[in-house]
Amino acid sequence: MPETRLLLIEDDFDLAEMLMMYFADQDYQVFHADSGELGIEMARSKYPQVILLDIMMPDIDGYETCRRLRQTSLTRYIPIIFLTQRDERANKVKGLELGADDYVTKPFDVEELRLRISSVIRRATQESLHEHRTGLPTAALVEEELEQREQGAIAYTDLRFIVKGFKAYCEVYGFLAGNEVFAFTARVMREAVTAAGTNDDFIGVLGDEFVIFTQPEKGDTVRDEVMRRFAANINTYYNFSDVERGGLVLNPGTGDEKLAPLMKLVQLQEEL
């Protein structure tokens, strides 16, 4: 299964090092920022599935960091857990009002923290807020984002993609390999938006369909960047013989044997 992406925004290097080592051992992909500003930047470029956020920071505090993360489409829906030495009720309420999903007070038990992280991610998945293979917002949040843009009369371009040949790939390589391809495609979307889009862009998943909302003037550039990144790397998910052959042999040795082309990313407006 793809690794869970965790962003730790914490300026205590000893604590950060301990948490990074622990969660790396738990098969998390851990990113670390030692300031609020850097944390916001990394949230926009790495698109973690959960953020651990300290309140006391050297530049902007955790509350302001959380507020900014909740202001932009690209990071609005990422679960946030506050990590702090403050345990007064008022501080907890303030964090939750800003959109935090949980609140852990230092000192803490690292196993309990792991369970809280798992619970936040699981809750988002079970409530159909985040797609389990990618951590991207799914149906309910896609509709919410779309409604906000339409009600606010915000101009946007709606880009929709699907992986043509994905079903045949899963039939031959199995669904675990298919999950890796799906996670790779989500990573392509995130990297393309980071490279060619804006902080107010949105990425989501509807079933097997990927959705990007971007500014109208960025539409062609983002689309081309998505296509380029996918095409440049998709062959690494095949074995050498399938790449050389140019496709997958389905139903080998039977009267229904046929060659299925390698996967290709297409826009839904295009002919599938």
Image (spheres, helix red, strand yellow):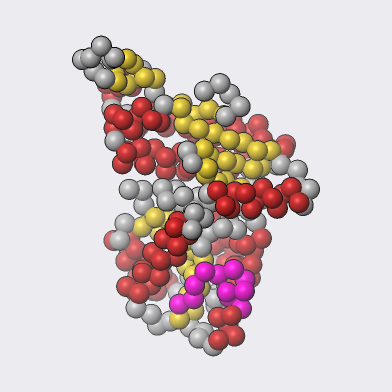
- Residue plotted at (41% across, 66% down): 119
Q: Residue 202's x, y, as percent?
A: 61, 47
- Magenta region: which residues? 94-104
Q: Is 92 above or below relative to 198?
A: below
Q: Position of residue 58 (x, y in %)?
A: 57, 74
Give x and y (percent) for residue 76: 60, 58
Q: Residue furthest top?
A: 255
Q: Which residue is drawn at 57% across and 29% down?
A: 268
Which residue shows up at 55% across the image and 86% down it?
Answer: 89
Please provide percent x and percent y for residue 25: 29, 61
Q: Against 135, is 264 above or below?
A: above
Count up the numbered dots.
Answer: 0
Of 3 and 118, which appears nearest the observer? Answer: 118
Residue located at (35% from left, 74% from top):
112
Residue 43, quarter of the rendered image:
bottom right
Q: Is residue 18 visible?
A: yes
Report if residue 86 lies within the magenta region. Answer: no
**Does the stretch in magenta take in 103?**
yes
**Is residue 121 visible to the viewer in this orientation of the structure?**
no
Q: In this view, does 70 lie above or below 113?
A: above
Outermost residue toward the left in this view: 253
Image vertical order of residue 66 relative to residue 74, above or below: below
| Image quadrant where residue 271 sits | top right
Which quadrant of the view contains residue 178?
top left
In the visual, does 249 lie left or right of 151?
left
Furthest-bottom residue in this view: 88
Compared across the picture, whether 1 is left or right of 47 comes to: left
